[in-house]
Image: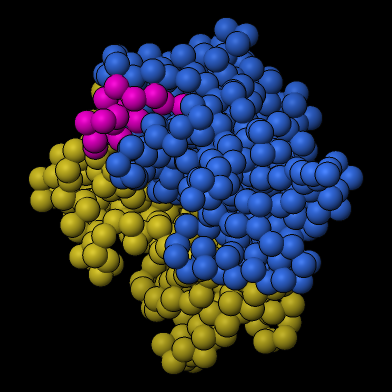
Chain colours: A yellow, B blue
Amino acid sequence: MKQVITMKLVLGIDGGGTKTEAIALDHNGGLLLRLTGESTNPHAITFPKAMRNLGALLDALLEAPELKGLDWTTAALGLSGVSTEEEQQAVYRYLQEFQKERGVAFDVSLLHDAQIALMATLEREEGIIAISGTGSILFGLTPEGKRYRVGGWGHLLGDEGSGYDIGLRTLKTIMRHYDGIAPATGLTELVLEAYGFSSPTELKPYIYKDSVQKSDIAKFAQICIEASEKGDKTAARILLQAAGELADAAIALIGKDQWFESCDLVTTGSIFSHSSFFSRLFQEKVTAAYPKITVHSSVQSPAYGAALLALKRYREHMSL
Amino acid sequence: MKQVITMKLVLGIDGGGTKTEAIALDHNGGLLLRLTGESTNPHAITFPKAMRNLGALLDALLEAPELKGLDWTTAALGLSGVSTEEEQQAVYRYLQEFQKERGVAFDVSLLHDAQIALMATLEREEGIIAISGTGSILFGLTPEGKRYRVGGWGHLLGDEGSGYDIGLRTLKTIMRHYDGIAPATGLTELVLEAYGFSSPTELKPYIYKDSVQKSDIAKFAQICIEASEKGDKTAARILLQAAGELADAAIALIGKDQWFESCDLVTTGSIFSHSSFFSRLFQEKVTAAYPKITVHSSVQSPAYGAALLALKRYREHMSL
């Protein structure tokens, strides 16, 4: 007698404000497929649009030749902007409806952004995660399941050490140099070159256009990083201040639970990944205050962490 | 034979982003009427709406019993947001049309914001004016007609030392205290009280509402001023930094023309008028760098300065 074993599939999804990444693993943890779709953050777009984008990504996975005939078991989703009980219930309802319509059935877990990001690098759900992308935030999760956060108040109330923060400091520095308040900096030339402007005054009509988003301002952080690598002292000072303020936030978080004092801290987001100088400054300040902390750069994407957690859930379910 | 002398009237108008003030003087400089209308800043509202508001204010003046039967001679207008040649021509065209429709005739001068503000306090068009309201800017005018400006790049590119800047620092400080990054400050309690919030976290849904304007953020500066007057050290530090940055801008402006080194400097705007502490910090830093500068607080409103300039134009015209 011949036994047919259908390969089992688990799915990890990392939903963000600009894109959503999905990773499918087989039940041995082997990578089957990685796909990217549109934003699924209901606050960046709208709730119905976020769910349509999530559905489109799931449909693409269901139709992918690489996944044909496999048995879907578990999906773990870390969706930024889905945090309240109400938002989570609405996502669960959407996914139930989706499964009914498509004639598929799999378990769904909604996870915290921090959980999937920690899992991706540490293969563990506990520790501290420092995120600096367009915005910035710190999360801490303890083995007892306690959750803490510092920062993440957005561009008006906080986000110190974020790309937006560094971008804005870069722009202000250029204008202060133009006005003769601050000394000359290579930032000016780099920005004029990158944007095809002939004078810093052209930043004004550009920056106040309705179409200019927070992420457009955060793009100037990349120019600051570039200038610091070319030895520009003003750019280096901006990164020093920003990294210092993010480290202050991390230090405040560590102070909230004794378990954090000797835990692992993962750094992630475009600022950490693009600037080793920023990463080093952040790490130095944090470990000067708490020498037993181990700082890691994120290696795998959060979607991979979500997939690992889906696998963990699947195995827990199997062993019941 | 009896001679009938018709009283001549001159008009000064100060147009801003939230309101427009008009002052009518007789040809001896006696105050006849002061009226306030809506915004006439084409960038705060739209150009047609700004002109409708200007027309409505002029109509109110034409119909005012106090001004009935008087001979309109000269109007001087300082309209914020009207600065390019194109914008000025459009205002002149609108006022020509207005005069034709209403059957009145008077000379029109469009003036610089700084000119009318300097005139109001110094009764002279030369000197430096430091403005700190919702935004901040510095203008310098020399007797040879040279014009300089520093700052005024708006809330994203500059506006250091403005109400917006102080308001934002106040909000960020409150969140940093909430997160345990910054020490406790009386600012938190004052803001919670004033806005009826039970936790600083309620600032987040408030501040990111579409209806919240730059001026709403600038309102938190008033709370910072209040806290500093009650002895709060964090609030005092915010004002020290903001006043210091505005003084740096003034110092940079003074450095641009030797004539400024011993000129008069007028401070105006809600931050200067509401905080003598801020005013003193600003003055101390500027005069430490340039001891021959004389700093004055604005006394009369810019509209009065505009009216004085209208009177000056009228008298020059009479003596031709």
Question: Residue at position x 29%, y 16% from top?
Answer: B292
Residue located farthest toward the right when viewing the structure as drawn: B65
Which residue is at the front of the view, A78 or A71? A78
Give left or right: position of B242 versus B82.
left
Residue A106 visible to an observer of this rendering: no
Quarter of image, res A299? bottom left
Is B262 part of what is drawn in magenta? yes
Range shown magenta? B250-266
Question: Residue at position x 36%, y 73% from top?
Answer: A31
Is B99 part of what is drawn in magenta? no
Give left or right: position of A125 versus B275.
left
Residue B28's x, y, as percent? Answer: 66, 33
Residue B299 visible to an observer of this rendering: yes
Q: Looking at the picture, does residue B198 appear above or below residue A139?
A: above
Residue A158's x, y, as percent? Answer: 50, 39
Question: Residue at position x 52%, y 14% from top?
Answer: B277
Residue located farthest toward the left when viewing the structure as drawn: A231
Which residue is at the front of the view, A307 or B105? B105
Question: Residue at position x 27%, y 19% from top?
Answer: B290
Residue B165's x, y, as percent? Answer: 50, 35
Residue located farthest toward the front when viewing the structure as drawn: B1
Quadrant where the image shows the C terminus of chain A: bottom right
Which residue is at the front of the view, B199 or B32? B32
Q: Looking at the picture, does residue B68 appear above or below residue B263?
A: below
Residue B171's x, y, as percent? Answer: 57, 32
